[in-house]
Image: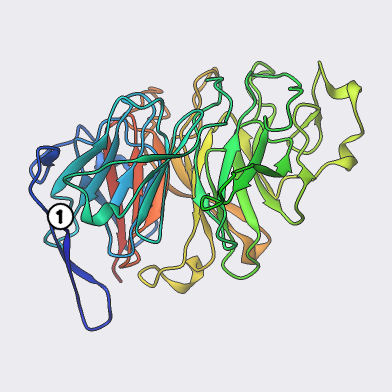
């Protein structure tokens, strides 16, 4: 059997990962990305660099306890594992774990196994860190809808041990009859008969969520509808306080914007759960994480980093940045990192997709436009 050999320092932190040989392994230690990091603005004492280049269509991120980073994508049908073998803060090897999949955007890691979400299936790669050079998968569940519109998924395991899986609305704006659409559900991946349980309704398209480290409540981003103009409705960051809550789609958006087609067909806006934060129209918030590490200053503890993929149908582009929301400060919203969009020329060179904390407390940001993953560090 192939293996990944890991060593740790006296604090139990990852020191080295020895990559195993295999035909699916590519050395990316010298790979270059076409990026312009000098234009990225960060708070004082923060730095950004390319952690891994040549990661085609890098989308959702997950990691093992010892720092192996798993990467899903939409356009290439592949799933990757990335290893920083010598622990120098830059990736050395890329493993292709699978190919020919249908938009395997979502990746999640639990108890040594990797889970991958396609449009209609959930796959499991058993004992993945010991099988990087010889991976195989099994189908855990294949009962999700086949619709491709908003069908790509972000997945993550909750504090309850269940795998949380969103199913977006199969349209820009519509009122699906099936309960599974425009919702977040959860499944027990070890059950003999898996049946999705819907935990949140009225969500057009979430591609990122996480749980508050103290309250254990689910927070998630939501991309609101198009074709209502440049400035409405706002995209959302939401907090689920009770199982079964409804967040308004397709009747109401951003808390108080009535849909011109469906707004009069249901209850008033007060009947729905309002956003915790309105993030701005068309910014396309995708991956988000609560920060739990020790590298960044204490003011970032329990704050939320959000990757904004950026607009595609607005007169002037917006988004293309990493935002910060501080629940401890009344959900204040600010910009943490920006510069992937040149405001004057409106040219873009990168699109943040997901964020993922490494064991040392640094923060990874994936970019499916520049085909790379950045690492943000802090040093006083």
| Left or right: residue 72 compared with residue 334 | left
Q: Quadrant of residue 161?
A: bottom right
> Is 115 in front, or is 263?
115
Residue displayed at 39% across by 57% down: 43
Q: Position of residue 187 (x, y in %)?
A: 59, 47
Q: Which residue is mark 1?
A: 1
Question: Does residue 290 show up?
Answer: yes
Above-or-below relation of 124 to 109:
above
Q: Quadrant of residue 194?
A: top right
| Left or right: residue 25 compared with residue 74 | left
Residue displayed at 40% across by 61% down: 111
> Is 81 in front, or is 266?
81
Local crowd size for mark 1, using a 10 Å CA cut-off: few (<14), some (14–19), many (≥20): few
Furthest-front residue in this view: 192
Above-or-below relation of 115 to 180:
below
The C terminus, quarter of image: bottom left
Question: Does residue 42 show up?
Answer: no
Q: Position of residue 197 (x, y in %)?
A: 68, 44
């Amino acid at each position: 059997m192939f293996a990944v050999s890991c060593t740790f320092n006296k604090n139990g932190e990852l020191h080295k990962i020895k990559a195993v040989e295999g035909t699916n392994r590519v050395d990316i230690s010298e790979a270059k990305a076409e990026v312009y990091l000098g234009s990225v603005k960060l708070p004082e004492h923060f730095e950004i660099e390319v952690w891994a280049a040549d990661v085609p269509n890098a989308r959702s991120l997950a990691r093992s306890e010892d720092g192996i980073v798993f990467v899903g994508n939409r356009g290439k049908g592949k799933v990757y594992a990335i290893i920083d073998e010598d622990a120098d803060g830059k990736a050395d090897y890329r493993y292709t774990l699978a190919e020919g999949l249908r938009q395997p955007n979502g990746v999640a890691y639990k108890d040594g196994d990797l889970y991958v979400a396609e449009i209609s299936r959930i796959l499991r790669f058993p004992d993945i860190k010991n099988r990087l050079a010889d991976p195989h998968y099994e189908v855990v569940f294949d009962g999700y809808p086949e619709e491709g519109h908003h069908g790509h998924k972000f997945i993550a395991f909750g504090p309850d041990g269940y795998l949380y899986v969103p199913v977006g609305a199969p349209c820009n704006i519509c009122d699906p009859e099936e309960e599974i659409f425009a919702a977040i559900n959860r499944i027990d991946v070890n059950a003999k008969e898996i049946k999705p349980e819907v935990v949140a309704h009225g969500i057009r398209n979430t591609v990122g969520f996480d749980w508050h480290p103290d309250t254990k409540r689910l927070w998630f981003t939501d991309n609101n509808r198009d074709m209502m103009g440049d400035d409405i409705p706002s995209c959302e960051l939401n907090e689920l306080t009770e199982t079964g809550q409804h967040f308004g789609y397709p009747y109401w958006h951003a808390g108080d914007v009535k849909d011109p087609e469906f707004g009069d067909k249901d209850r008033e806006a007060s009947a729905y759960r309002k956003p915790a934060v309105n993030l701005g129209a068309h910014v396309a918030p995708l991956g988000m994480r609560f920060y739990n590490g020790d590298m960044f200053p204490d003011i970032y503890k329990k704050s939320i980093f959000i990757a904004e993929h950026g607009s595609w149908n607005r007169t002037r582009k917006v988004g293309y940045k990493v935002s910060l929301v501080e629940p401890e400060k009344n959900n204040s919203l600010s910009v943490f990192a920006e510069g992937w969009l040149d405001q004057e020329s409106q040219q873009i060179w990168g699109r943040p997709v997901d964020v993922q904390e490494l064991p040392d407390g640094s923060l990874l940001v994936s970019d499916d436009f520049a085909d790379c993953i950045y690492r943000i560090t802090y040093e006083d």
